[in-house]
Amino acid sequence: MYLILVYDVEVRKVAKIHKFLKTKLNWVQNSVFEGEVSESELVKIKTRLKKMTNRKYDSVIMYTLFSHKYTKRTVIGMERNRLENVI
């Protein structure tokens, strides 16, 4: 499945969450990641993020799509991290 994940967390947690997500997904821009994941990998991501965040102050939103081929991605302005460069 294809996952688009956005987050807004306390400043002191940003670097730690960013570092974790870079191991699982492609970084798109500041607090946005996307990429193909298995169902078990999605569970691991959710579990880890629940441990790293505070439900009262932090927000993580995940959009799951069954396939990337049914999505259209349009960038207006500068592309922060080109996905074509990811192996």
Image (cartoon, rainbow, N blue to C red):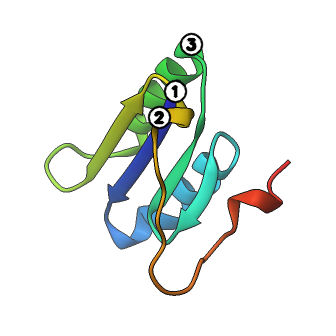
Q: Residue at x 43, y 61 (%)?
A: 13
Query: Amino acid type of disc 2?
Result: Tyr
Up the image or down, 33 lies above or below 77; here it is above
Rendered image: mark on residue 78: none
Up the image or down, 15 lies above or below 39; here it is below
The percent position of residue 3, horizontal first and vertical second, equals 48, 36
The percent position of residue 25, horizontal first and vertical second, equals 63, 44
Mark 3 or mark 1, which is nearer to you? 1
Residue at the far top in the pictured view: 40
Q: Give the mark nearer the N terminus: 2 vs 3.
A: 3
Query: Amino acid type of disc 3?
Result: Ser
Distance from disc 3 to disc 1, alpha carbons, whole Å, reads 16 Å
Rate crowding at label 3 as few (under 14), some (14 to 19) or many (20 or more) other CA atoms within 10 Å: few
The percent position of residue 68, horizontal first and vertical second, equals 54, 35
Rendered image: mark on residue 70: 2
Up the image or down, 48 lies above or below 53; here it is above
Query: Amino acid type of disc 1?
Result: Ser
Distance from disc 2 to disc 3, alpha carbons, whole Å, reads 22 Å
Q: Are marks 2 and 1 in contact (CB under 8 Å)?
A: yes
